[in-house]
Amino acid sequence: MTTSNHRGLTRRELLSRSLVAGGSFLVGSSWITSGSAAWAVEVTALKPETMATLVQMARDIYPHDRLRDEFYVVAVKGHDTAEQAPMVEEGIAALDGAARGKGHSGYLGVGWEADRVEILRAMEESAFFQTIRAGLVTGLYNQKEVWPLFGYEGESYSQGGYINRGFNDINWL
Amino acid sequence: MVAKYDLSDDSVVVIIGTGAGGGTLANELAQKGIKVVSLEAGGRYLPQDFINDEWESFGQLAWLDKRTTSGDWRVARDFSGLPAWIVKAVGGTTTHWAGASLRFQEHEWKTLTHYGRVDGANLLDWPIDAAEMEPWYALAETKMGVTRTGGRPGLPGNSNFLVLEKGAKSLGYQDVHTGNMAINSIEYDGRMSCQQTGFCFQGCKWGAKWSTAYTEIPLGEETGFLEVRERSHVARIEHDAQGKVTAVVYFDADGQEQRQAARIVAVAGNSIESPRLLLNSASSMFPDGLANSSGQVGRNYMRHVTGSVYGVFDKPVRMWRGTTMAGIVRDEARHDPARGFVGGFELETLSLGLPFMAAFLNPGAWGREFTSALDNYENMAGMWIVGEDMPQETNRITVNSDDVDQFGLPTPNVNFDDHPNDVAMRNYAYAKGAEIYRAVGATQAYPTPPYPSTHNLGTNRMSENPRDGVVNRWGQTHDIPNLFVSDGSQFTTGAAENPTLTIVALAIRQADHIAREMAAGTI
């Protein structure tokens, strides 16, 4: 995971340095952090505000309330490259524009998930949306740290399989 | 001692592919003392190399060479470059298969006779029947150690099976059990028994599942008559002025073009690559491709009527634990047109890990409806529908004239439209699957669309009359006596059963025929 909660900054410093509070994120000059400052991620090619919006968009595409933001940050961090930045900046700008068209300050200013989803539905055929969504299928669900939160146990060979560990232990039938 | 043959040795049988058909044929011929060169496009991976991680394993084993798709099937929309989920490795798709080993039902050898003409379908009777195949099936079952045959016990049922069994029996289904599986329920043939590890699709790390990679291939090599050349991608088959095949041209592991002379060539590259190879071998004598005087090469592509049903319960099932496909309901496999379609289907247990569930549950879907399904992953049970699909002439493999692969060879296109019979069967099966799970308390049931095809069949079909198909009753091409087809592409029709057992039985029988004809000097 590329996030960290130290980088020499205390929570108070992180909060005091944040430029923008958008959604549940605090955005700095080259980083975003959670509102609790439990983690922060450095943003290199994208504008930090763009990354914050992208993370919210990722959660709105595949919303799992049991998953903390860090997992979504990791899932979209691969788009923070010089090569992809123009496409992402343009896409997020369109997302913000659509939100403003509905009277919001921007995508992160839309309070209800259903209202954000309505904005996303209108652009779901776009190459930008499809790139982000397709990337999330592996970017989010192939994180081994996510698996236990769904109960999924991954490989079992190293433990000798389930032959003595509950392959048929269903007890409610 | 592993054999090593000279490229100019024109006394060898060259087999293209090392999966269920090609791998079995190679060993069977080698056991008879016949010289064999097996050309395999993929590398060699053994149980210690297999990776129990879905995406990583996919990267290791899957055939990912460029392919295109067309037609109204949903795979063409969701996975346009991946029509099939099959394997490029020594052992072919027997590394990936789940082990279900079912014989065809008697009527399924003669569908035109039993079903009658079906509009838009190219039904045809096989030139062979259940009685003729019975001893070959028995040999295949013994070779593969199929459970519940030959006195071998069944596998124990995992939780996913117990859910299926209880639901199915409460609906009155009778023929419900843990399947006829080429996965050892007891130690057999020097291989250990199933450890209920899951990840059957990623290669069995215990070697409990039969795969030519570590059964037929090393057994053949031990005879000293079989040479396997891995990472050897065949480009074309050559012939002489008399129209007999003489050599196979391939790119070796270093990308160098090589030419192996041959007395006999057997094609076993699965139902996309095998017709592609025949089409790409077109010459002035055979301008439409080898063995294609019927025009049937590449046609009648079948993939089974598939689909999955995942049921969600209020308590955990943990379907990923244990043997993936050791559970079956066979009652619907019968032919009973009163249901609104011809042919039948099997229901078999299935599970995907979380990463593949996310990719395949409802490709392209997003939002809370989708994620609420995944949120219940631990409480899911899963089953797979495997039913007979209709052969259609327009469902076919063609080669793209304007698109080439890494070797400069025209890439294959897979065109597939569902037949109305396929759609009717799938919808009926979805409803039955949901009923089974609801009978044991499912709160949701998801009718999941077909995955990229693992059962690819029919593109070099077997026929009595050379006008109707590509190969005769021995898998020998009607047009070229020393050219054989040894994989599932020779299927005349697909039946409701997982095809591997039948491919293996046909390969054993074909080896017998080839040896006999070689001895008689007729080929």
Image (cartoon, rainbow, N blue to C red):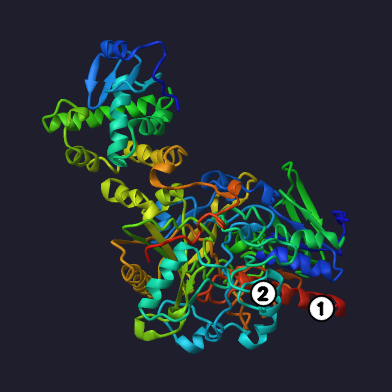
Mark identifier at residue B517: 1
Position of B514 compared to A91: left or right? Answer: right
Residue B464 versus residue B193 in the image, above or below: below
Q: Name the side, left or right, on which A162 lies relative to B216.
A: left
| Quarter of the image that includes the C terminus of chain B | bottom right
Give coordinates of residue A136: x percent, y percent: 39, 39
Viewer-side residue, B126 vs B194: B194
Give the residue at x 57% y 75%: B102
The disc label shown at residue A100, or none: none
Q: Identify which residue is drawn at 54% across, 85% down.
A: B110
Residues beneath discs 1 and 2 located on the same chain: yes
- Helix, strand or loop at disc 1? helix
A28 on left or right of B333:
left
Q: Which residue is mark 2?
A: B141
- C-alpha distance separating marks 1 and 2: 25 Å
Q: Quadrant of the rendered structure where residue A86 is?
A: top left
**From the image, which quarter does the N terminus of chain B lie in?**
bottom right
Front position in the image: B443 or B54: B443
Label 1 CA crowd tier, 10 Å (few <14, some 14–19, many 20+): few
Where residue A133 sits: x, y (%)? 35, 40
Question: Which amino acid, mark 1?
Answer: Glu
The percent position of residue B213, horizontal first and vertical second, equals 70, 57
Please indicate, yes or no, whether residue B59 appears anywhere in the rendered image: yes
Q: For mark 2, does the 10 Å Cα neighbourhood hold few (<14), some (14 to 19), or many (20 or more) residues?
A: many
